[in-house]
Amino acid sequence: MMRDSERYLAQAEAVARLAARAASPAEREVYLSIAEGWRKLATEAFRNERQDTGRPEEPRSFQAED
C-alpha cells in the first residue's frame, strides 16, 4: 500500500513533467507552483508518518530542489 507522502510526491513529479512541456512561461510557472504545493503536502504527510512510525530521517526525495 502506498503511503500518502508517496502519492503526493508522485503527483508533484507528474505536474513537474507537465511544466517541462508547457506551451508558455506563464503556464510553466503555474505547473511549477502546483508541483511545489504537492511537494510541501508530501513533506508534511511524511513528517506525520514518521511520527507514527518513529523513523528519524527524511528521504532525499523530499528535500527541496533548486
Image (cartoon, rainbow, N blue to C red):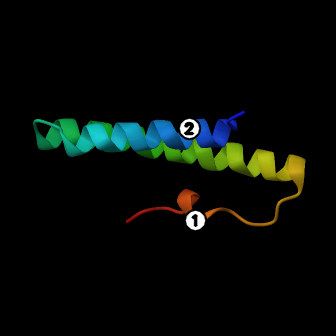
4 relative to 66 in the view: left or right: right
Q: Amino acid at mark 2?
A: Tyr
Question: Mark 1 Cα within 10 Å, few/some/many (few <14, many 20+)?
Answer: few
Q: Residues within 10 Å of mark 2 (few under 14, many from 20)?
A: many
Side of 35 where 29 appears, left or right: left
Q: Identify the residue under disc 2.
A: 8
Q: Identify the amino acid type marked 1.
A: Arg
| Badge 1 or badge 2: first in the primary sequence | 2
Image: 52 above or below 58: above
Could you say where residue 18 lies in the image, as x and y percent from the top left? 27, 37
Marks 1 and 2, how far apart in space? 15 Å
Using residue 47 as the reference point, say whether residue 37 is left or right of it: left
- Tell me what residue is drawn at x 79 percent, y 46 percent: 49
Q: Label 2's element?
A: helix
Q: Quadrant of the C terminus?
A: bottom left
Residue 50, placed above or below residue 1: below
From the viewer's side, name the closer residue of 43 and 59: 59
Looking at the rendered structure, the number of numbered marks drawn on it comes to 2
Residue 39 is left or right of residue 56, and the answer is left
- Eyeballing the image, is 18 above or below 58? above
On the image, which quarter does residue 54 sit in? Answer: bottom right
Q: Are marks 1 and 2 in contact (CB under 8 Å)?
A: no
Tag of residue 9: none
- Residue located 55% across and 47% down the image: 40
Task: Give coordinates of residue 4: x percent, y percent.
Answer: 67, 36
Q: Which residue in the protein does label 1 denote? A: 60
